[in-house]
Amino acid sequence: MHHASTLTPPSANPAQALARFAHALTPAALPQAVRDKSTQHILDAIGLAFASNTFPFAGPALAGIRAAGAPGEATVVGANMALAPRDAALANGYLMHGLDFDDTHPAAIVHPTVACLPAALAIGQATDARWGDVLAAYAAGMETAIRLGRAVKGGFHHVGFHATGVVSHFSSAVVAGKLLGLTVPQLVAAQGITASTASGVQVFLETGAWTKRMHPGWGAMAGITAAHMAGAGFHGPDRPFEGKFGFFDAYLQARAAEVDADSIAQDLGEHWTLLETAIKPYPVCHFIHGAAEAALALRADVGDVGQITRIECELPAQTLPIVAEPHASKILPRSDYEAKFSAQFVVAACLLRGRFTLAELDDASLADPAILALAAKVQCAVQADTAFPKYFSGALRVHLKNGSVLHRNVPMNLGSGERALSLDDIAAKFRANAALRLPADRVETILQALLAADDDTPVRELAGLLG
């Protein structure tokens, strides 16, 4: 039996508002801050795609995508491979999200760039678009992904869905539809179609399975399909979010009561939520960043980690089921992905090594007896004073054998708000990631080309550098 809807109906149709916004948006209408921010986040995602090619999870996925897909002219970043647009978007989404080192919007709890850029690059190439058109489509998609995630107030995670996975279908449909020149009704239809494809469950957390990596690319493939179908006249639902048996009710059930559906359209084009998106300084789940930073800050004071008897790690209550529980599993991660979602492992590695880089996720680090012994001493609890989800806070209390207790609280994680990474920081991250795949001179060529691109730069010209 269908439960009675608990959703507060929006005062205006969100899909129509997003469609009108996307359709009207031009490159000239993008504020300079939005342009700069978009370029920085695109740069970050492309660097991560290059890096992912060097990790064991890349090969099997790319082989499978190529076997199931079709050859074409759309670039797969760093893979020396060109596929049909939908297949390239799936592959690039997988690579950009593969290391879980990509950007996050804190309030939405989504990785918005990977929910937009794979579709933008693929359809931008297919339509021979200019870079300004891609930036406008990307920005429209970012606002779609972020506003949908923000409206549910963490609800997707609470009921077992990966928020980035589900919203990427809608944002990719908007991105692809805009680049394909869809009308407002067709953009609404494309969103309606993706209400039937949106997917992504969090069962990967049990074993560190690779499925989370594929979610946003799958959304890009579905969004591109929906845009083409809508453009061909396919009749999609026109109230995909708030309609009877619609997206919010079907996916959130009783938690639909918590959705602020009116916030999706509020101040569209005036308040740019993408400006609030944070680029990660550490390659782990963003929920752990505050605690990781606290550990790094305390390392010098701790000195000999052999003197540590107990570590109390405080995190926002909503994050504990994802990054701290069950304790017995989190202290013995079996894969790099399990380690990324283990507050215990990340805190221990930071205290022991004074850093957390991709090197801390290699097989030797996962088996390092010193890290594992220290991880076993980490007990996670609810942080009472937190601004989550605006910021990913964290606090540590490190107890030493001499009876002293060292404390550090990080209310605002590095990369967020006033502590956003600078362009120099982002460029350094790009260089480090891309250099895992490419020689230094080619890394620099790509970096400068992306930073110098203007509205008239052909997307195919830039994409040609990325293969």
Image (cartoon, rainbow, N blue to C red):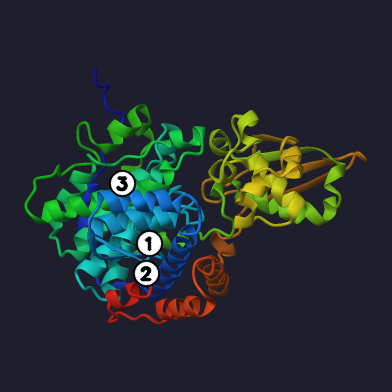
Report helix, strand or loop for mark 2.
Answer: loop
Give the residue type at disc 1: His
Residue topped by disc 3: 262
Mark 2 and mark 3 lie on one chain; the one further toward the N terminus is: 3
For residue 252, side relative to residue 432 (left or right):
left
Q: Amino acid at mark 3?
A: Asp
Q: Nearer the viewer, mark 2 or mark 3?
A: 2
Q: Position of residue 235 (x, y in %)?
A: 9, 45
Query: What residue sits 85% from the left and 43% below the top?
Result: 306
Give how far apart the Cα atoms at labels 2 and 1 are.
Answer: 35 Å
| Residue matched to label 2 | 467
Q: Nearer the viewer, residue 416 or 7?
A: 416
Q: Are marks 2 and 1 in contact (CB under 8 Å)?
A: no
Quadrant, the N terminus = top left
Q: Taking the image as drawn, is residue 21 in sight? A: no
Q: What residue do we see at 21% from left, 67% from top? A: 126
Density class for disc 2 (Cα within 10 Å; few <14, some 14-19, many ≥20) is: some
Q: Which residue is mark 1?
A: 271
In the picture as drawn, the residue positioned furthest to the right comes out as 402
Q: Quadrant for the C terminus, please.
A: bottom left
Q: CA distance from mark 3 to mark 1?
A: 14 Å
Residue farthest top in this picture: 1
Element at label 3 = helix
Q: Nearer the viewer, residue 362 or 9?
A: 362
Q: Measure how far apart labels 2 and 3 are at the Cα level.
A: 41 Å
Left or right, 228 with respect to 422, comes to: left
Q: Is residue 356 above or below residue 388?
A: below
